[in-house]
């Protein structure tokens, strides 16, 4: 896979929660560090995602918003 995005984190799928339209995928990228991604159900099926699958979390964002109480 070659991609221009530089924010790539390799990990393993921890859980996949299928819904009628979207799927929530939790990825473990380091010990105790998880990223959650919501993708279409169609994409989840095409990628054949399941617990333990090796994946890359590719992050492309124009903004990072921080908040405090």
Image (spheres, rainbow, N blue to C red):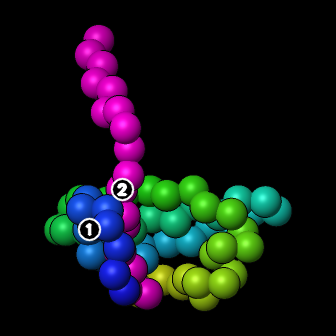
The residue positioned 26% from the left and 16% from the top of the image is 68
Q: Is residue 56 magenta?
A: yes
Where, by quadrant of the figure, is residue 65 drawn?
top left
Against 37, residue 53 (above or below) is: below
Q: Earlier in the sequence, mark 1 or mark 2?
A: 1
Q: How many marks?
A: 2
Residue 12 visible in this rendered orientation of the protein: no
Read off the magenta span: 53-69
At label 2, counting other C-alpha atoms closer than 10 Å, the crowd grade (few under 14, some 14-19, many 20 or more) is few
The single residue placed furthest to the right in the displayed view is: 20
The residue positioned 24% from the left and 62% from the top of the image is 6
Q: Look at the image and tell me in which quarter the N terminus lies.
A: bottom left
User: Of residues 49 and 32, which is closer to you in this image?
Assistant: 49
Taken as a whole, is the magenta stretch helix, strand or loop? loop
- In the rendered structure, find residue 61 and report the number of the disc placed on it: none
Decide if residue 61 is on the left or right side of residue 41.
left
Q: Look at the image and tell me in which quarter the C terminus lies.
A: top left
At label 1, counting other C-alpha atoms closer than 10 Å, the crowd grade (few under 14, some 14-19, many 20 or more) is some
Query: In the rendered image, which residue does mark 1 sit on?
Result: 9
Query: Mark 1 to mark 2: distance in Å?
Result: 8 Å
Query: In the rendered image, which residue does mark 2 sit on?
Result: 59
Image location of residue 14, percent across then percent down: 42, 74
Against 13, residue 48 (above or below) is: below
The residue positioned 37% from the left and 64% from the top of the image is 58
The single residue placed furthest to the top in the displayed view is: 69
The single residue placed furthest to the front in the displayed view is: 4
The answer to whether marks 1 and 2 mark residues whose Cβ atoms lie closer than 8 Å is yes
Image location of residue 17, percent across then percent down: 62, 66
Decide if residue 23 is on the left or right side of residue 57.
right
Image location of residue 33, percent across then percent down: 24, 59
Q: Is residue 12 magenta?
A: no
Image location of residue 64, percent across then percent down: 31, 33
């Amino acid at each position: 896979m070659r991609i221009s995005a530089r924010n790539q984190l390799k990990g393993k799928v921890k859980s996949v929660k299928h819904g009628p339209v979207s799927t929530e995928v939790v990825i473990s990228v380091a010990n105790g560090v998880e990223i959650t991604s919501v993708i279409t159900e169609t994409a989840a099926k095409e990628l054949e995602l399941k617990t333990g699958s090796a994946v890359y979390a590719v992050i492309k964002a124009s903004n990072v918003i921080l908040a405090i109480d």
